[in-house]
Amino acid sequence: MTSLVIQTAFLGDVVLTTPLLEALARRTGPVDVVTTPAARPLIETHPGVRRAIPYDKRGRDRGVAPFLALARALRAERYEAAYLPHRSLRSAALAWLARIPRRVGFHDGWPLLYTEVQHRPAGGHESDRLLTLAGEPPHSIVPRLSPTPADEAAVDAWLGAAGGLAGGFVALAPGSIWGTKRWPYYHDLAERLARREGIVVVGGAEDADLASEITAAVGRSGGRAVSACGHLTLRQCAVLIARARLLVTNDSAPLHLATAMGTPVVAVFGPTIPEFGFGPVRETDVSVGLVGLACRPCSDHGPPACPLGHHRCMRELSVDRVLAAIEETGALRRRD
Ligand code: SF4
């Protein structure tokens, strides 16, 4: 019988849940996943997933009646087991109300609603921590996504229309929903990189203004950068990142897309730190952050605005430091 995974956290968390999905699928076949409408396209094509079930907990499905309707629908599926990587009361209650006989969650979630409780490791990468729900050792499975041939073709067409990127390009992801996680110097970095590399800005439609700053700055210096923000679907964005020689990103979802697509990464950390478990996975990727700042880190997610008002964690992180990190990856020295 099929297992169910309930993961309605942020996009990046869903990407980091893919090793768990793969581990479970290897044992009992592809699983069903309850996830957000935003994350659904990312995992519905994953080979470890039979069906991605959207649950719009903050929108259309907000409130008790849609929640109970989903619980009834899940109950009718007669799942054998539910896995609960997200420490959310709503997820735990959903599995319980769906009367799924085996419910596996972490000790720091809602153990009274689980039938099996796993200890969530304090350290390590989040993708490895989530894997322990399936009893798998760390590093045994890495995050991955499976875009379709149609996604690949759409990106080929977009790159063809953008032109001038045949020699390869560096992708920049300047956005984040958390204001303090946005490094403010992507336009300066782009100007300096554009002397030797094509530049593509990646993100959603909400990042279009940030992208315009970058493309305008590069344009003023005689270079060329193009923005894909809002022009591609999420899976196509993953393909675009896969085509890049390197991604420079904040501590946000594109970092995990690059991890899942095998693209070298430089990750810029401000109010958060890689030790929280959400940094790059590969040893050849590089994280940069301001060392020795007493207020850092200041929160799990990064606050919307700096509580001290100065935002030194990002403002004092120089373009030279990020350029040095790019060199450290070696990604731009390799021409294949
Ligand atoms: S308090 Fe410190 S770590 Fe937090 S946002 Fe401000 S400068 Fe960054």
Image (spheres, grey):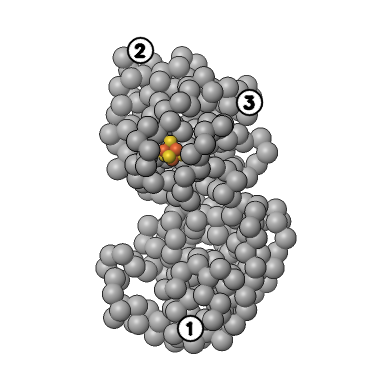
Please indicate, yes or no, whether residue 149 appears anywhere in the rendered image.
no
Mark number displayed over residue 221: 2
| Residue found at the very far top of the displayed protein | 222
| Image quadrant where one finds the N terminus | bottom right
Q: Is residue 123 left or right of residue 219?
A: right
Disc 3 CB within 8 Å of nearest ligand 1 atom: no
Q: Name the kind of residue labelled 2 in the image.
A: Ser
Residue 285 at what x, y percent from top left?
Answer: 62, 36
Q: Residue 105's quadrant in the figure?
A: bottom right
Instruction: Determine whether label 2 and label 3 are within 8 Å by CB.
Output: no
- Could you tell me how far apart the alpha carbons at marks 2 and 3 are, in whole angstroms? 26 Å
Where residue 312 sits in the image (x, y, percent)? 43, 31
Residue positioned 36% across, 62% down in the render: 37
Establish if 179 lies above or below 1.
above
Q: What residue type is labelled 1?
A: Trp
**Numbered badge on residue 244:** none
Count how many numbered circles sit on residues in the image: 3
Q: Callout 2: few (<14), some (14-19), or many (20+) C-alpha neighbours within 10 Å?
A: few
Q: Mark 2 falls on what kind of element?
A: loop
* Residue denoted by label 3: 328
Residue 87's spot in the image, x, y percent? 50, 67
* Pointer 2 or 3: first along the chain: 2
Amino acid type at image mark 3: Glu
Vertical order, 274 against 319 (above or below): below
Q: Position of residue 159 (x, y in %)?
A: 41, 33
Residue at the disc numbered 1: 96
Which one is earlier in the sequence, the residue at label 3 or at label 1?
1
Q: Distance between the residues labelled 3 and 1?
A: 48 Å
In the rendered view, does 176 fall on the left or right side of 109?
A: left
User: Which marked residue is nearer to the observer: mark 2 or mark 1?
Assistant: 1
Left-right relation of 22 to 211: right
> Residue at horizontal 48%, vertical 27%?
317
